[in-house]
Amino acid sequence: MSASVTRAGSDTAFGTVGRARHGLTLGGYAICMRGILWREGLRFVHQRGRFLSALVRPLVWLVIFAAGWRQVLGVSIMPPYHVYILYSTYVVPGLLAMIQFFYGMQSSLSLVYDREMGNMRVLLVSPFPRWFLLVSRLIASTVISVIQCYAFLAIAWLWGVDLPDYGWITVLPALLLSGFMLSAMGMVLSSCVRQLENFAGVMNFVIFPLFFASSALYPLWQVQQSSPLLYQVCLLNPFTYAVELIRFCLYSTFNPTALAVVLGCLVVFTAAAILAYDPARGLMARRQRAET
Amino acid sequence: MHGAGRSELRAEAVRLAPPSNEDELALSVEGVSHSYGQRRALDDVSLAVPRGGFTALLGLNGAGKTTLFSLITRLFDTRRGRISVQGFDVSRKPSAALAELGVVFQARTLDLDITVRDNLLYHAALHGMGGRRARTRAAAVLQEVGLAERARDKARQLSGGQMRRVEIARALIHEPSVLVLDEPTVGLDVASKAAIVEQVRNLSRTNGVAVLWATHLLDEIEPDDHVVVLHLGKVLAAAQMSEIVASTGAADLRSAFRALTGTAAPAAEAEEGGA
C-alpha cells in the first residue's frame, strides 16, 4: 500500500525531498492502526510472562477460590440463568471482566512506562490525529484482552465449567465493548500517574475496590442483603455493568441497562483520555507546566 | 560583554540571519514564548532553518532547547508565536507539518523488546507507510546508517551509538524534509559522536534534508554552520559561526559564546547529561 503522504519533489539517493502535497488517506489510517495493533501484539508475544500472569490470576480464582466457596455461596436462579448453577459457573463472567480490567491497567501501565522511556513521543509525533492514535491504541489493547479471555474460557471449559455453545460467539461483542471501556479507563488513569512507581497506588485505590465492589464475585442480591450501602456502591460502579453485560451475552441474552452504561462509560472515558493527552488542554500539558 | 553590547550583537545577528522568505525555509520559528507556570522557558524566540541547510542550536543545559523541540514536534501546544515546517503551521496544520518532520529525541525512544527492523516498520506505519515500501525504506535507511546487518537484532542488543543511528534512520524512514535532533550525541563516546555528526552532515549535504541540531557542545559546530545561540530562553545570536565569532571580536566560538552569554561553554570532554 502506498504512503499516506504524496510528494512532489526532487528524488535523491536517500529519498524524496521537496514541497509535499499532503493528505492522510484512508489507506494510511488503516496502515497506522494496523501498525499500532501489530506493535501491541509483538510486545505481548515477547513478554510471555504477561500472558501467563494474565491467565494465572483468574485461574487461581476459578480453581482455588471458586472451589472453596462453591459449598458456601449458593447462587439461586436469577437472570440470565434458568437453573441452579455452581459458583464456578457464576464467577466466570466476572473473571473475564477481571482479565480485561487487569489488561487495561497493564496497558495503561505500559503507557506510563512508554512516557517515562520516551516511546510515547514516537506515537505522539505521528502526523495522524491524536484521537485516532489513542483510539487505535485502545483497540489494540482490547483485541489482546479478548484473546486472553478466549484462552481463559477454553481452560475454564476444560476444567469442567459448563458454558453454552452459542455463548462463545455471543459474548464477543460484550467483550469488545467492555474491553474498550476498561482500556479507556486505564488510559485516563495513566494520564494522572506521574511515575511508574505510583501505579501501585492505582492498584490499591482503583483496581481492587472496583473489582470487589461489583457483581464479579457475588450476586448483587446477596450484597444487598448484607450491606445496602455496598449494594448502592456496586450499582454506581461501571465495572458491575461490564460484568453483567458479559454475563448476559455469554448466555445469549440481552441486558439493556448494562449495555447503556457500558456504552456511556466507553464514550466518556475515551473522550477523557483524548482530552487528557491533548497537548493544549490535557492533563499532560498541565502536568508539564506544574513539574518544571 | 553585557547589557547594551549583547543587544547590539543581537541586532547584528538578525541582519546576518538567513533569508526570511518562507518558500526558502524548511523550519520557521517566529516570536515563540513558552512558560512553565511562572517560569518563562522561551522568550520571543525566532529562528529559521533554510531548506537543505544545517543549523546548530547552541545552548547550555536549561537554555530552552528541549522546550523548543517539544513545541516544534507539537508535544506541547504553541500558545504564543508561530512555528511552521515547510510552510505548514504546526498548530493549524499539524498533520502536514509533522509529516515533513523527522525527530530524534534526546532520550532514547526505541522499543528495546522488538527488533531494529520492527522499530523502523512501526514508525513507518505511524506515518501511513506500510507493506513493501516500508520494508524497502527500512532496508535503505539502515544501509545508510551502516546497520543493515543488525536489522534482526533486538534493539537492546545495540550499543548507545548504534541505537542513536537507528533512531536517525527511523526519523528518516518517511522521507522528511526537516530533521530535528535534540542533543543526539549526549552519553556517547568520542568516536560515536564524531560518526553521528558526520553522518547527519552528509545527509544534509547529499540529500537536501534540512537539519536543526541542538547541542551544547562547541566541537560539533563547523565554521560554515548557521548557529543560533539560545541562552535562558532567548536567542542571543543567529548567524554563520564565523560571523558570530567576528562580530564579537572573539578568537573562537568558545570565547564568542562566553562574550554573548557571560557563561563559559562546557568543555568537550566533560559534557554528559541533558538540557
Image (cartoon, helix red, strand yellow):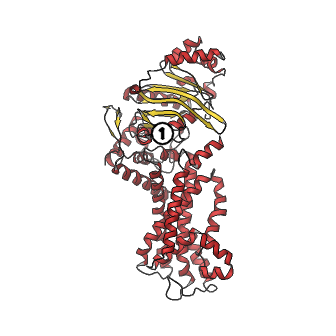
Residue B195 on image: x %, y %: 48, 30
Is A49 above or below relative to B73?
A: below
Which residue of the protein is positioned furthest toward the bottom in this rendering?
Answer: A83
Residue A24 on image: x %, y %: 36, 46
**Residue A284 appears in the rendering:** yes
For the C terminus of chain A, the image quarter is: top right
Is A79 above or below relative to B113?
A: below
Q: Quadrant of residue A166?
A: bottom left
Of the residues shown, which amino acid type is indicated by label 1?
Ser
Query: Which residue bears the numbered disc 1?
Result: B91
Q: Secondary structure at mark 1?
A: loop
Q: Looking at the image, which is closer to me, B139 or B228?
A: B228
Residue A121 on image: x %, y %: 51, 44
Q: Looking at the image, which is closer to me, A203 or B232?
A: B232
Q: Residue at x 48, y 39 (%)?
A: B91
- How many C-alpha atoms fall within 10 Å of the one at disc 1: few (<14), some, or many (≥20)? some
Is B254 above or below relative to A126?
A: above
**Residue A119 appears in the rendering:** no
Q: Looking at the image, which is closer to me, B1 or A273?
A: A273
Q: Looking at the image, which is closer to me, A98 or B44?
A: B44
